[in-house]
Amino acid sequence: MSSGRRVGYLTEASERDDDWAAHVEAQRRAKREHFRDSPQSPLPVSMWGGAFPGLGYYETDPAYRFVLPLHEHDESETVTVETTADGE
């Protein structure tokens, strides 16, 4: 049974063939800015700003793009994921 919800990058805009690559590029740009400029960056302060070397990506390739339905289980299960932050 599909809930109709979307996860992360699976938005209405990214499902259209004409702009999915632009959506991926926008996400990459946002991630780059977060790593470089955000106080919540996972990088040490010494790598912020102009010292940030950037992130490497492969070119977008439509051969590796899949649009598939998401199916949510009737009975959900909570999964705890360990992180480097305090707590869970």
Image (tube, rainbow, N blue to C red):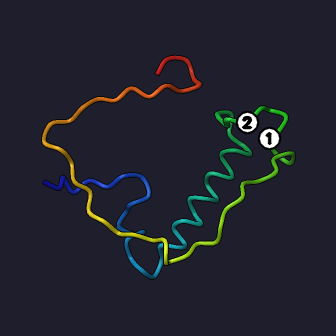
Q: Given the image, on which type of amino acid does mark 2 rest?
A: Leu
Q: Position of residue 75 (x, y in %)?
A: 15, 36
Q: Residue furthest front?
A: 63
Name above or below for residue 79 compared with residue 32: above
Q: Earlier in the sequence, mark 1 or mark 2?
A: 2
Eyeballing the image, is 81 above or below 20? above
Task: Name the residue rendered at 39%, 69% in the picture.
Answer: 66
Q: Nearer the viewer, mark 1 or mark 2?
A: 2
Indicate the amino acid at tag 1: Trp
Residue 4 in the image: state x and y as whole percent: 21, 57
Q: CA distance from mark 1 to mark 2?
A: 7 Å
The quadrant in which residue 24 appears is bottom right
Give the secondary structure at mark 2.
loop
Q: Quadrant of residue 42?
A: top right
Q: Residue at x 38, y 76 (%)?
A: 16
Q: Which of 85 and 30 lies nearest the eye of the viewer?
A: 85
Q: Is residue 74 above or below residue 8?
A: above
Seen at 45% across and 71% down, the residue is 65
Q: Residues within 10 Å of mark 2 (few under 14, many from 20)?
A: some
Task: Kindly identify which residue carries mark 2.
Answer: 43
CB-based contact (under 8 Å), mark 1 and mark 2:
yes
Please name the residue that numbered disc 1 is placed on.
Answer: 48
Q: Position of residue 78 (x, y in %)?
A: 29, 29
The image quarter containing residue 56 is: bottom right
